[in-house]
Image (cartoon, grey):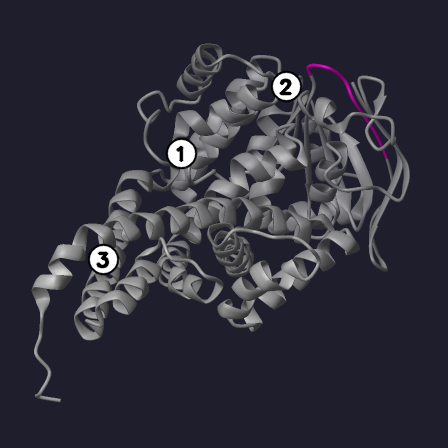
Amino acid sequence: MFNYTFQWKQVYARLPEMLEGALVTMQIAVLSMVIGIVLAVMLTLFRLSGNRILGGVAQAWVEVARNTPALFQIYMAHFGVASFGIHFSPWTSLLIGITFNNAGYLAENFRGALKAIPDTQARSGRSLGMSELQAFRHIVLPQMLRIAFLPMSNQMVWAVLMTSLGVTVGMNTDLYGVTQDLNALTFRTFELFFVAGVIFYAIVKLIQLATRLIAWRMFRY
Amino acid sequence: MIEIENVRKSFGALEVLKGIDLTVQNGEVLTVIGGSGSGKSTLLTCINGLEPINAGTIRVDGTEVHAKSTDINKLRQKIGIVFQQWNAFPHLTVKENVMLAPRKVLKQSRAEAEAMAVRQLEHVGLGDKLDVYPTRLSGGQQQRMAIARALAMSPRYMLFDEVTSALDPQLVGEVLDTLRMLASEGMTMICVTHEMKFAREVSDRVAFFHQGVMAEIAPPDELFGSPRDPNLQQFLAATH
């Protein structure tokens, strides 16, 4: 192993490309979280609706998202649906796969958060003349998102890390994909992936810092 | 006017209201007393349709509460209710707690709702707590906030369900004072309470519930002075 000569200069020259890849990674992670939260709220409403079909859809979604590998989910979103003639770009497939995973995990987090909110909260809203949906939207939902905030930030971290699975469906513009391509070009394997690891680490630390700032700014009660 | 006719209500096999007949006139203050499990709180949640009933009818201003065709959300705007547990919305400030329903249900503008909220909160003595979160308030203050929240909808009727039962003894007075004030302003009220002195002072009539039946109803002097129902006699002897 000591015959290996580190060549950091080559990697340094490629750093702008890698940082550009990091931006794509962040973009996919943020989008998958925003859409994932919306879908998870929808799944939560499905489960609360008492409708057996909607409840079944939500349950199946959560089960698959949580009990199969994220890699499987991304694969299905690309090669799986391609079998039926639906062709997504690697970017789209990766986004769909991670979003699907996020929504499933978040819906389960929301379910737990809901249990911590007494029924009397919604009941109070109803007694003021609010509809069921209004009571959920204005009284239950904000409290639910606050309780589930830390699990949500966890999922955000997972979303960033899951983007690395995109290489399996041909994704080559995100941080991991860019690194992989550069490796094929230069064979500076250790240096390249070491730097990619550092960037991933920095992104996650940034998310944790942002989480704290948001919590401090938003939750004053 | 609230008209209750032969109302029956069961939870499973347990019948908690066994045919209640009662009419509350506008401007009247009715207090309901009785032991736990006598059905008095259940009656309140039936009046604003939070609980379904098994038989009979409840009409508020002629509208049948439990009829399928009734827009219950609209009817509830007329009927304010305050519970034993005040259920402050923890994510909203005191002022926002009071503004929420007028904004979303009555579609008032922010300025309109805010003016109303400030007026109602000052009314119940919380004018200096507008922008704090409810967790910073004492139980009595939170309960007064809940009263202001209900009043902000400009209800025609107010239902109070043992609103002082969960409070520390030294905080009961401030909430009862608020109720007295509303009564003196002519609000139509039904108060389920264990505060006998309060019932005696503010009521036009007092109803005594026992095991799902309204055993006696009379003006306070008569009901407390010369109770006829043996269960009421026993109840009063035990609470005095």
* Chain of the residue where label 1 is placed in the rendered structure: B
Mark 1 highlights which residue? B141
What's the chain of the residue with tag 3? Answer: A
Q: Residue B130 at what x, y percent from top left?
A: 35, 24
Residue indicated by mark 2:
B155
Within 10 Å of disc 2 (Cα), the crowding (few <14, some 14-19, many 20+) is some
Q: Residue at x 59, y 41 (%)?
A: A122
Q: x, y (%) of residue A61? A: 63, 60
Marks 2 and 3 close (CB-CB < 8 Å) = no
On residue A26, which mark appears?
A: none
Tell me, yes or no, whether the highlighted magenta stretch contains residue B24. yes
**SS at circle 3:** helix
The chain containing the residue under callout 2 comes to B
Spatial CA span between label 2 and label 3: 52 Å
According to the picture, the residue beneath numbered tag 3 turns out to be: A205
Q: Position of residue B196 (x, y in %)?
A: 59, 37
Q: Are marks 1 and 3 on the same chain?
A: no
Work out whether residue B24 or residue A145 is closer to the camera in this orientation and state it: A145
What segment is highlighted magenta in the picture?
B21-27
- The quarter holding residue B150 reads top right
Q: Is residue B164 visible?
A: no
Tag 2 secondary structure: loop
B223 over A59 or under it: above or below: above
Asked if badges 2 and 3 are on one and the same chain, I answer no
Say which quadrant the C terminus of chain A sits in. top left
